[in-house]
Amino acid sequence: MTDIQRVLLDENQLAQRVKELGGEISQDYADGDLLLLGILKGSVMFLADLARAITVPVDMDFIAVSSYGTGTSTSGQVRLLKDLEGPIEGRDLLIVEDIIDSGLTLSYLIDVLKSRQPRSIKVVVLLDKPERRKENVVPDYTGFQIPDEFVVGYGLDYAEQYRSLPYVGVLSPSVYIGNE
Ligand code: IMP
Ligand code: MG
């Protein structure tokens, strides 16, 4: 626990908010053909819990992108590492992302996916750091707005570590100092 400066969102807060988001999404997609599109790997815990809080039928698919090396801020370049398995034409796509920071990842993905002509595209993020936005992306559903601090846990990593923590915590800067 020494790598974690403080717990920002504990298990109860996460569970409560994910349930609320699931309720909202279920209402909005009552007549939809909902495809949850998880962005690997950070969204995995969130997607697993969110899917179980959604009461309408859902399909799931996954995509992997990379914009971070092992540091704590974006490299500014987004690459597609793994594409979806199936076509999305005519589907109601809900992109599920762990966190929006600069917005570069989501704005790139939305462009790529729009060209494949889904019926609709919306975005749900667990966390939003609005202070750091460079691209004008506004998520349709947001779990929590958080301050500009580097967080890990509940799927979020630093250099592939800490994803399995059950809470979201602020990483001690001593862990990454010199490696931003
Ligand atoms: P963006 O392209 O700058 O919006 O960055 C989005 C991606 O950066 C997310 O999918 C995360 O993988 C990563 N990211 C941004 N902030 C954090 C953080 O505080 N902790 C862990 N990963 C982060
Ligand atoms: Mg990510």
Image (cartoon, grey):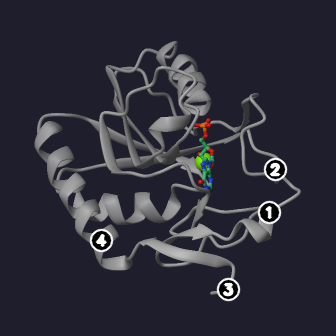
Amino acid residing under circle 2: Glu
Q: Label 2: how many residues lie within 10 Å, few (<14), some (14-19) or many (20+)?
A: few
Asked which quadrant contains residue 94, the reply is: top left
Q: Classify mark 3: residues with Cα within 10 Å, few (<14), some (14-19) or many (20+).
A: few
Tell which circle, 4 or 1, labels the residue nearer the N-terminal end: 4
Amino acid type of the residue that numbered disc 1 sits on in the rendered structure: Tyr
Image height check: is 106 above or below 54?
Answer: above
In primary-sequence order, the first of circles 4 and 3 is 3
**Helix, strand or loop at mark 3:** loop
Dot 2: element: loop
Q: CA distance from mark 4 to mark 2?
A: 29 Å
Q: Give the labeled residue for mark 2.
A: 180
Q: Kindly identify which residue carries mark 4.
A: 13
Query: Which of pointers 4 and 2 lies earlier in the amino acid sequence?
Result: 4
Residue that mark 3 sits on: 2
Q: Position of residue 112 (x, y in %)?
A: 58, 20
Q: Amino acid at mark 4?
A: Gln
Picture disc at residue 176: 1
Q: CA distance from mark 4 to mark 1?
A: 27 Å
Mark 2 → mark 3, Cα distance in angstroms: 20 Å
Q: Give the image location of residue 172, x and y in percent.
A: 68, 71
Mark 1 lies on a secondary structure that is helix
Q: Is residue 132 above or below residue 62?
A: above
